[in-house]
Amino acid sequence: MLRTIYAMLSTGSHYQDKTVDYEALSVARNAPRWLKMLRKHGFIAAPATA
């Protein structure tokens, strides 16, 4: 743990866990908002309501 902290402090970088796909988490979190805006601006047809 100290080696990781030293490496982060010496390089000035943030910790990124190698087992976590941060890009996929970001997409999963933001996709509903992106789709809502695309529908609002007419790029995607709104789903038909029954």
Image (cartoon, rainbow, N blue to C red):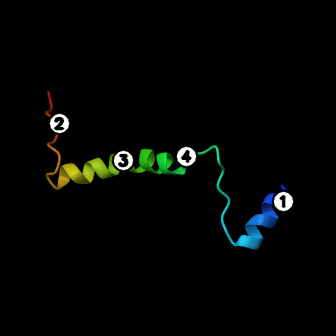
The nearer-to-camera label among 3 and 4 is 4
Q: Residue at x 19, y 49 (%)?
A: 39
User: Can you say which quadrant of the picture contains the N terminus?
Assistant: bottom right
Pointer 4: residues within 10 angstroms few (<14), some, or many (20+)? few
Q: Could you tell me the amino acid type at mark 3?
A: Ala
User: Can you say which quadrant of the picture contains the C terminus?
Assistant: top left
Residue 29 falls left or right of residue 36: right
Q: Could you tell me the amino acid type at mark 4?
A: Asp
Marks 3/4: CA distance? 16 Å
Residue with the mark numbered 2: 47
Marks 2/1: CA distance? 52 Å
Residue with the mark numbered 4: 21
Asked if marks 1 and 3 touch (Cβ < 8 Å), the reply is no
Q: Could you tell me the amino acid type at mark 2?
A: Pro
Task: Please say if 7 is above or below 20.
Answer: below
Of the image marks 3 and 2, the number of the one nearer the N terminus = 3
Marks 3/2: CA distance? 16 Å
Between 40 and 31, the one nearer to me in the picture: 31
Residue with the mark numbered 1: 3
Residue 46 numbered mark, or none: none
The nearer-to-camera label among 2 and 1 is 1
The nearer-to-camera label among 4 and 2 is 4
Task: Please say if 16 is above or below 14.
Answer: above
Q: Quadrant of residue 16?
A: bottom right
